[in-house]
Image (cartoon, rainbow, N blue to C red):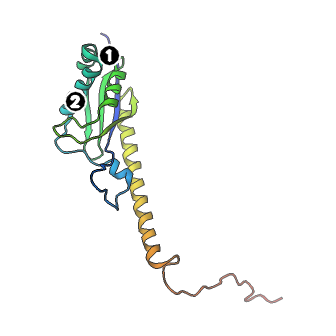
Amino acid sequence: MVRTKERYLLVNILYPPDTSRPAPANVPDYVALHRPTVDHVNAQTLSRGIKSAVATLFGDYGLGATESNLSVKYLSRATSTFIIKTSRTHYRLVWAALTFMDQVPVPEGSTCIFRVVHVSGTIRKAEQEAVKRARKLILEARDDAAASSSATLTSLFGQNGGGDEMMVDESDDSVGEEG
């Protein structure tokens, strides 16, 4: 029995800012770029969209090489992340097709960028990388929110918190020492 070798591609869907609509003022750029995907995107629609992109770029050869073993194993609409399983010999065809896709494969899909962020031989490593990236994004958003709230407080109250506090010098060491 011959073991088929696969590659797992971890892909982020990024949504560039829409210039026709004004951007919300209080949302950081990286949060707007990583916004959640629409609800009617599922694994089957993504798989069909990727297969049609492969067929457009590489014709019948590309479609025949990737169609039998291309599948979406994981999809998170909240983080706009998914994992694709494909054969090791033809994963570059799928990667190229993802690079050239510019819309979510649903009717009236929004403009987006598919970015392959990790290629792995096992699904476990791809999942670990997805968790690591999601955690990093959450920590960046939390740190940015904390920095913006402290900047808002500084702008409202001034550098030291706004109170008219008296500065106390606690470095007087001469008390209690007799020479």
* Percent x, y of residue 40: 16, 41
Residue type for callout 2: Gly
Q: Quadrant of the N terminus?
A: top left
**Residue pointed to by mark 1:** 4
* Percent x, y of residue 126: 36, 34
Q: Relative to the observer, which residue lies in front, 6 or 124?
A: 6
The residue at 31%/44% (across/down) is 15
Q: Residues within 10 Å of mark 2 (few under 14, many from 20)?
A: some
In 3D space, how far apart are the residues under numbered discs 2 and 1 (Cα atoms)?
Answer: 24 Å
Q: Quadrant of the C terminus?
A: bottom right
Direction from residue 8 to residue 107 in the image, left or right: left
Direction from residue 170 to residue 135 in the image, left or right: left
Pair 2/1: label in front: 2
Residue 69 lies, with reference to residue 43, above or below; the image says above
Residue 53 lies, with reference to residue 39, above or below; the image says above
Q: Relative to the observer, which residue lies in front, 51 or 142?
A: 51
The residue at 27%/41% (across/down) is 111
Q: Residues within 10 Å of mark 1 (few under 14, many from 20)?
A: few
Q: Relative to the observer, which residue lies in front, 83 or 156?
A: 156
**Residue pointed to by mark 2:** 49
The residue at 19%/39% (across/down) is 41
* Percent x, y of residue 91: 35, 22
Residue 89 appears in view: yes
Sequence-first tag of 2 and 1: 1
Direction from residue 106 to residue 33 in the image, left or right: right
Q: Secondary structure at mark 1?
A: loop
The residue at 18%/31% (across/down) is 44
Residue 69 appears in view: no
Task: Place residue 45 in its image quadrant.
Answer: top left
- Give the label on residue 95, or none: none
